[in-house]
Image (tube, rainbow, N blue to C red):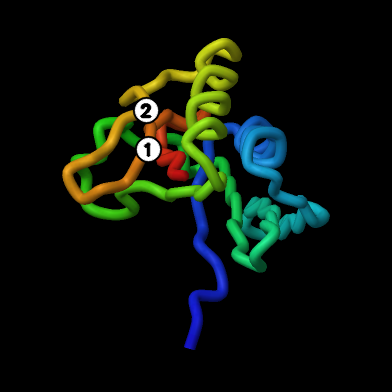
């Protein structure tokens, strides 16, 4: 068994798609649109085969809180290979105007990570 993909609702799917493509190396497939329901989706594929589905629909409009205290997806984590890369990507995202929720640090469970908010406020961990 394996997880095939993770899906994420977005209020601005183009912006969300570009965020995950630009900063995390996702490769976006074509947009699927169901005119009957208004659903639009993009699948992004990452180097290790993991996939993220970014979805939008006119009736799904509430952005998620960035504090991670709701029931549901708590965060997604991307391993970037080194502490230096965690630091550099966190700085790049901050300079681009994205909210850094926690600066790079060693966590209690031994990870070296930072945490940023994506365009919809979802938590994204950047780990070594």
Position of residue 98 measured from the top left corner of the image (x, y, whole percent): 50, 19
The reply to whether the C-beta atoms of the residues labelled 1 and 2 are less than 8 Å apart is yes
Q: Which residue is drawn at 59% across and 57% down?
A: 52
Q: Residue at x 22, y 52 (%)?
A: 71
Dot 1, how many residues are within 10 Å of its Cα: few (below 14), some (14-19), or many (20+)?
many
- The residues tagged by marks 1 and 2 sit, at their Cα atoms, a distance apart of 5 Å
Q: Residue at x 63, y 42 (%)?
A: 24
The residue closer to the viewer here, 65 or 57, is 65
Q: Which residue is drawn at 64% across and 34% down?
A: 23
Q: Which of marks 1 and 2 is nearer the N terminus?
A: 2
Label 2: state its secondary structure.
strand
Label 1: state its secondary structure.
strand
Give the side of residue 7 with respect to residue 20, left or right: left
Residue that mark 1 sits on: 113
Position of residue 96 measured from the top left corner of the image (x, y, whole percent): 60, 14
Dot 2, how many residues are within 10 Å of its Cα: few (below 14), some (14-19), or many (20+)?
many
Which residue ends up furthest to the right in the rendered image?
Answer: 30
Q: Residue 6 carries which label?
A: none
Q: Is residue 63 visible in the rendered structure shown here?
A: no
Position of residue 88 measured from the top left corner of the image (x, y, whole percent): 56, 24
Above or below 69: residue 28: below
Position of residue 90 measured from the top left corner of the image (x, y, whole percent): 50, 25
Residue that mark 2 sits on: 104
């Amino acid at each position: 068994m394996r997880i095939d993909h993770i899906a994420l609702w977005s209020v601005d799917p183009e912006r969300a798609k570009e965020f995950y493509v630009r900063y995390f190396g996702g490769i976006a497939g074509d947009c699927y649109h169901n005119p009957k329901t208004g659903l639009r989706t993009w699948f992004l594929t990452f180097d290790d085969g993991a996939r993220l589905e970014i979805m939008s629909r006119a009736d799904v409009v509430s952005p998620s809180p960035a504090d991670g205290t709701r029931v549901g997806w708590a965060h997604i984590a991307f391993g970037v290979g080194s502490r230096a890369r965690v630091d550099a990507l966190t700085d790049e995202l901050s300079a681009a105007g994205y909210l850094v929720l926690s600066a790079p640090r060693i966590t209690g469970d031994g990870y070296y990570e930072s945490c940023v908010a994506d365009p919809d406020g979802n938590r994204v961990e950047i780990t070594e």
